[in-house]
Each structure stands twice: as structure tokens, then as C-alpha cells.
Amino acid sequence: MARLLRPLLRGTTYTRLLHLWVPMLMVSVWLYIDPSAPWVPALLLLPLGLVPAVRRGEGVQARLMLTPGEPEPGISEAPAANWRDRLRTVLWLELRMVLGGAAVFASVWLPVLCFELVRCAWGDAPAGIPLLGRLPPHPAWALLAPLPLLALYGVVVGLGELVTAAARRLLGPSAAERLAALEERTEQLLERTRMARELHDSIGHALTVAVVQAGAARAAGDPEFTDRALSAIEETGRAALEDLERVLGVLREAERPVSARPTLADAGRLLESARASGATVDAEVTGPVEAVPGPVSREGHRILQEALTNALRHAGAVPVRVRVAVTDGLLTLEVRNPLPGAVPGPGRGSGLRGIRERAALLGGTARTGPHEGDWQVRAELPLG
């Protein structure tokens, strides 16, 4: 019983009923002007539905009154973009008027019918109600009095569900709108994947530097070296916190400019951090690095960061050779370091995979693995 009466406690039931009543206001005004032609309002809806903005207005109404509070109601708020959308809007307007007429008729006459049955049970003859006027007054009619109210309940709830289903069908997103929404969702997922890679690169680099620095300081037993190590850990940690705050801001959909991400112009900080960890870094930069386009420069910085992180993590304080060259529309990044022991197989870690994914995203290539007795990370990224 409680489940049966639950729709009466939901506000959506009454907003849907109000949505059905709204078109009848225009019909009521017209019937006051010319009751001999009640079909005129339905005729006026034909050209009205062809106006592109009408679809947007109907979509906004339907979302607010038929599906209040639903995050994805399946009803579009975009104007009609083609003739198919316009014809669907016309059909929706006509159907809404028909269902609205049924809702108004039931809302008015079913309560009247209930009242007249009660009068008939009390001995009064019903007035103005077809069929009931021929029935003799009798107390037994009181048993039938609740039936019109139950019918009204079923009509209100049923018409509300029907008009909502019709709105999703006729005012729902078109194929082009669904494709655009799918593309937007794909872009969001790609952006979040890129943010995850950035977190891996930035936080992984900071933790690697901190671990290497702490281990070297403890082994050295030199207060001056320990101070330098702590300074390097502090600087790297601050940079990682900045990256973390920026990435979390993007994930929260904050309006942060992409240009705030580090570029190759900030590569000096990476090299100094690696040197402070005990590695001997031989860096060579050729060509106009500052002229590298923003997306390429930012991804190049991340590739360089991950390559240095891998060198520190797996090889320790070893000589590292870094080459950055901008020539003939191509950015070349190369990081090489000697292998500490046996030559391993090709790298399959998430960091190395991220390097290859970043390069492929920009239409470039990246190779990671042993090369002439060293471990090499080499990426080539087109500038245009």
C-alpha cells in the first residue's frame, strides 16, 4: 500500500501535471475568443514548432518539470539544428497538447463525478452528468464514489510517465548531439589520463630525488653535503607540490591555464636536482629551445623529467648525458647513462610507457632501452 501511494509524496508527480496543464492556458484563452473552432491552437503549433529556438525552450521546460534533479535526463536543451529536429518538435507540441487536454479533462470531471456519486448516495439526483441523471438515488452509490479518485490517480501518474517518455524520445539529443557529447567525454577522459601521467612523472621524480638524496647524505656523513641534500629535497618537494596542486585543480575542473605547466625553459631545475642527487650531468642544448611550441615544449619537459627519474632510480649517482636539440622542425631529446650491472631487456615500466605515449600523442617517436653499453631514452618530436 505504501508503495502504491509513493507517487503522491513525490514532487515530480505534481510538476509533471503542471507541465501538462500549461498548454491548456493557450487553449482556454482561444476558447474564450472563439469556442466554435477549438482546433485553431493545434494548427498554430505547426509553424511554431519549426522555429529552432522553440526546441530549446521546450527542452528547458521538460528538464525542469518532468525530470527535476536528474543529472542526465536524456532531454536536449539545444535549438533545432535540422529539419528532423524541427519535425520532432512539432510532433512533441501536438502530443503535449493532446496529453494536456486529457489531463485537464480528468482533473476536472473525475472529481465532479465523485461528488455527484456522493450526492446520488444521499438521495439527490445528479445534475448535468450524462448517464448518472437516469440512475435512481441509492446509498449503494457511495461504494462507487472512490473509483473516480482512483482513476484520477492512475491518469495523473500514467500521463506523467507517458509525457516524460515522449519528451526523452522527441526532445532527446540528435545523433549529431550524441556524437558531440561522446567526443567531449572522450576529450575529458584523455585529459584525465594525461593528468595521471603527469602525477606519475612529477611525484615519481620528487620521491626518487628525495630517496637518493637521503641515502647519499646518510652514507656521506658530511654536514655540508647533508645541507645541500636537504635543500635539494626541499626544492624538489615544493615543485612536486605545485604540480600536484595544478593537476588537482584541473581534475576539479578549475579554470587553470595550460600554460602554467613547466616547459623545456624550466629544464635547468631538473638538471640541478639530478646533480644535487649525486649524478654527474653533462647537458648540451642546441637550437632555439624557447621557440618550441607550447604543447611540444611541455611534453618534452615531462619526457626529460621521466628519463632523469629513471636514471636516478635504477642507476643511482652515475654520469648522465643529456642532449636537447632543436633542428629542422624537430625536437630531439636524448638521455644516456651507464648501466650498473647486467644489461636488462627493453623497458616496460609505466614511466617508459608514458614516454612513448607522450611522443606518439604528438606524432613523434621514442626509443627506450640499452644502446652501446648505456641505457638510452631518445625521443623525436615534430614541432609542427
Image: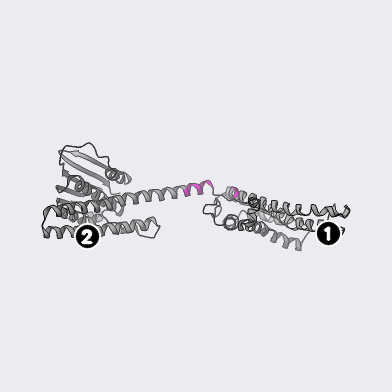
Question: Can the viewer see residue 83?
Answer: no
The residue wearing badge 1 is: 119
Measuring from the top left, give residue 188's x and y in whole percent.
Answer: 41, 51
Q: Which mark is residue 234?
A: 2
Is residue 177 one of those drawn in magenta?
yes
Please name the amino acid that badge 1 sits on: Arg
Residue 164 spot, x, y in % from top left: 61, 51
Name the element at disc 2.
Answer: helix
Mark 1: secondary structure: helix
Q: Total of numbered circles in the picture?
A: 2
> Do the CB atoms of the residues marked 2 and 1 lie less than 8 Å apart?
no
Residue 378 lies in what quarter of the image?
top left
Q: What's the residue type where badge 2 is placed?
A: Glu
Decide if residue 47 is on the left or right side of residue 333. Answer: right
User: Horizontally, is 81 left or right of 326 in the view?
Assistant: right
Look at the image and give the residue range highlighted in magenta: 169-181
- Looking at the image, residue 114 sits to the left or right of residue 204; the answer is right
Q: Report x, y in % for residue 365.
A: 27, 42
Pinpoint residue 29: horizontal percent, then vertical percent. Answer: 72, 63
